[in-house]
Amino acid sequence: MFVVSNSQVIAIRFCLPDTILTMKQGIVLITYPDSLGTNIKQLKQVLDSHYAKAVASIHVLPFFPSSGDRGFAPLHYESVDPAFGTWEDVQALASAYDLVFDYMINHISSKSPYLKQYLQEGEYSSNKALFIDYEAFFSGEPTREQVDKIYKRKNKDPYHSVTFADGATKKLWCTFSEEQIDLDTQSEAGKAFLKHNLEHLASRGAKLIRLDAFAYAIKKLDTDCFFVEPETSRLLAECRDIVAPFGADVLPEIHEHYSIQLKLAQEGFPVYDFALPLLMLHALYFNTTIYLKNWFSICPRNQYTTLDTHDGIGVVDVYGLLPHEEIEKTQQHLYERGANVKRIYSSEAYNNLDIYQVNCTYYSALGDDDRAYLVARAVQFFSPGTPQVYYVGMLAGRNDLKLLEETREGRNINRHYYSLEEIEEEQKRPVVQALKLLMELRTSHPAFTGSFVLEESEDDATICLSWETENTKLTLHADFPSRSLSIEENGKSIMKL
């Protein structure tokens, strides 16, 4: 029996099989290399000690030498940042867990050796074709109409001016920060660069390579330069073909209308479920599962589900799945009822906009309510696809306002650095212990190798989800108003909240 922080009780009766199934069936942990301890060795120590039965795979966020954006402005992919460890440390992690690596397909650091060489050598540099000459792309200075047509997440034109060794200047395409200069994925040099890096990462033990900012990777004149078709789908297929001989696959990271995920899934690619986080908040805030059930009836089955990631809680991802007024109502409720979260944290003042994402930990978005949080996680684990759990969420982490204010970076509210001592203390919290049991169930139970079923439920305030094989069936019953859940194995209760 666990006594939770809001004085309610979680009564658990639990039986787990002795063996864990293949790692691909279990929980994927998302973590920075220096967030559970200070390096990759300590990360493995933490997982081996506390989560060996709960975590099957690990998405290690960028561990390469980088000039910014918490690793997402890589200098290159050839080595591990010495602050995090070595390739031997990565291999040791891969010996126990399947690994997911990031490849920033859209950009490279402005301080990378590739750009430095181009700036030093000028127009005759072999690296010139890696980058996109902004004005040459438009055959001169673009019109305001052309620029406004481009899909942008920042209030700036998508270029950065660079200065060459001889004093000449040029505008290079730059979608995000000035630390991240876009790559030309369509030039011969760009294609060779892509192939080299993907082969290198796959050969280093990546089972899955996440293609960061994938929808921005194709630029085409007189388009919005976002998920340009058919070129983008063709690029994804090329990436898959490159890594397939190494036994790896690719996962495109795209935050936008859910129809994009449906399209790619229909083409046989794994995709993200970025719609689930806000749909789940809406269901728990307003005690209705109507929109959640609709999504489960149509969502891809070959998907990776999320409630939290290193970025914010997605908003654009639910357009068309939640009515506009319900989206606004959910955001307003979050700011009013969440724990230590304000609208300004998702504004330009903190380098983000809440029309795209809300900066908050998922636990704090639910008001630091243990029962609501465990219901959300249980429903995620029974959703179609493979569940991912962010390291802050694994420890039911609260908003880190200190780090937020120190950095003035909105997303850092959800990027706490946990020391080994903190992690040991967090293990004592009932909500962390209960979540670990849920994770162990999701990683080990054979039912999750079978088929997902959206069962009939009593009313719109409840939901019933099952997974079943020929030999076993596991069913979740969740009641949103009471924040209660029960899990049955072949009709026999094994867990109650």
Image (cartoon, grey):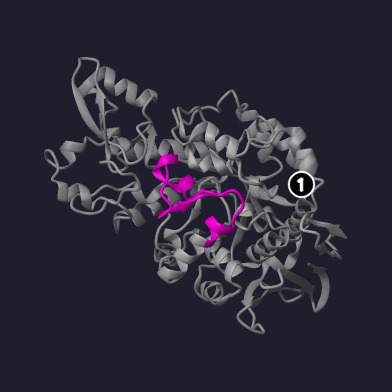
Identity of the residue drawn at 57% across and 52% down: 308
Could you say which is closer to the camera, residue 10 or residue 188? 10
Q: Residue furthest front?
A: 336
Identity of the residue drawn at 50% across and 27% down: 65
Q: How many marks?
A: 1
Magenta region: which residues?
333-360
Q: Quadrant of the N terminus?
A: bottom right
Instruction: State the SS at label 1.
Output: loop
Look at the picture and state if 100 lies above or below 1: above
> Can you give x and y, in whole percent of width and height, for residue 115 in the image?
33, 26
For residue 217: magenta?
Answer: no
Q: Quadrant of the C terminus?
A: bottom right
Q: Which residue is mark 1?
A: 52
Left or right of 398, for residue 221: left
Identity of the residue drawn at 35% across and 32% down: 178
Residue 468 in view here: no
For residue 336: magenta?
Answer: yes
> Can you give x and y, in whole percent of width and height, for residue 377 in the image?
67, 60
> Can you give x and y, in whole percent of width and height, for residue 448 in the image?
69, 66
Image quadrant where residue 228 sits: bottom left
Left or right of 314, for residue 60: right
Look at label 1 and name its amino acid. Answer: Ala
Image quadrant where residue 114 sits: top left
> Can you give x and y, in whole percent of width and height, for residue 272 in the image?
50, 58
Look at the picture and state if 334 lies above or below 205: below
- Label 1 Cα neighbours within 10 Å, binned few <14 / some 14-19 / many ≥20: some
Residue 424 in view here: yes
Left or right of 353, for residue 16: right
Look at the picture and state if 82 lies above or below 268: above
